[in-house]
Amino acid sequence: MSGPRWPAPTIAVDWNKPIEGMVCAAMWPTMSLGVRERWFDELYVWTEGFQASTMQRARIQLNGVRKSFALLEQERVRKIGVTLSFGTIERSLDLLTAQFDENRLLSHRIVVLLRGQFDRLRSPYRVQGFIDWMRSQLIPVGYRLTSPRIGMEMRTIDFLRPDFAKVGAPPSVRVEYWQDMLIEARSAGLNPDWLVVSGIDTEAQKTLAKEAGVAFAQGAAVKAAYDPPSTRRPATLPIEPLPQGGNETVAPATIPGTTSVL
C-alpha cells in the first residue's frame, strides 16, 4: 500500500535506541454500495520495518486523533474515522479524553473504531468508561473485527455493544458465503445495515458484496485510498521593530514548518 511515510525514531521512548522503520498512513473512504453516499474517511495508520510496542502504538494513535481533528478543523474532510486499541485507552485515557474535550465543536464529525481482544483487557472499566463517555458526546463507536469469523469475537462484541462494525472481505467467490457473514453478524447482535466490509479490491468482490446486501465498503474497487492532506501551517516570526524615525511596516517572515509523525 502506498502512502506518506515518516521515520519511526520520532516515537522512540529511548532516544539512545532509535527505531529502524517507518510509520505510514492513508485515508480510506467508506462508501455505501446502495447509493453514492460517503459515510467517513478512515485515517488508516500502520508500521513498516518494525513491530510497534503498546506504548509506541499509543503514541501513533494519539497523533492520529490529533491529526483527525486538525483535518476537520481545516475542512479537509467532511467526516473522519480513527482507530484506537484497547491498550491505548487503558494507558492514555486522560490524554484521549482531553483531546476530545478540546474539540467538542468538531466531535460530531468523528467516528471511533476500537480494536482489541476482550481476553487481553487489563482494565475493562477504563475502556467501558471511555465508550460511555463517547456515546454521551454522540460519537459513534465501532469495532474492528480481526478474526476470520464474527462468532469468534462474541465476548468482545457483547462487552462493547458497538454502534457499527468493520470486517474484512470474505475469502470466497460464493455469494452464499457473503450472505452467511451478514446472517452471522445479525446473530451476534450487530446491525448489518451498519457493517463496513473492507478489502473490496476487485470488481468481482464488489459485485458479490452488492448481491449479498453489504451496506458500506472500503477498497480500491469502491474508491481508492489517498494521502492524508497536510495540516501544517507556516509559522511566522514576530514583527520586527520599526527603525528609528521610520514609519514602514515590516511584514512577518515565514519559517519552514517542522515535520512529525502524522
Image: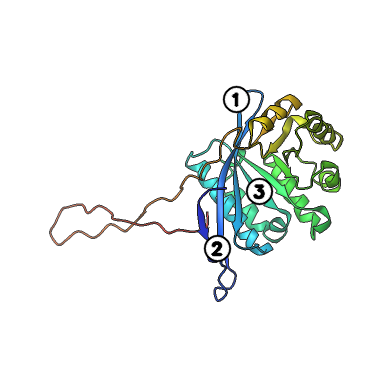
Residue occupying image coordinates x 67% and y 59%: 92
Instruction: For mark 3, give the secondary structure.
Output: strand
Label 1 vs 3, first from the N-terminus: 1
Could you tell whether 118 is left or right of 249 in the image? Answer: right
Residue 99 is situated, as x and y percent measured from the top left of the image, at 59, 52
The mark closer to the camera, 2 or 3, is: 2
Residue occupying image coordinates x 67% and y 51%: 84
Instruction: For mark 2, give the secondary structure.
Output: helix
Q: Which residue is mark 3?
A: 83
Gap between marks 2 and 3 measured at Cα: 19 Å
Label 2 vs 3, first from the N-terminus: 2
Farthest residue, direction top:
35
Which of 49 and 28 lies nearest the eye of the viewer? Answer: 49
Q: Which residue is mark 1?
A: 36
Instruction: For mark 1, give the secondary structure.
Output: loop
Q: Is residue 217 above or below residue 99?
A: above
Q: Which mark is residue 8?
A: 2
Q: Give the residue type at disc 3.
A: Thr
Which of 111 and 144 lies nearest the eye of the viewer? Answer: 144
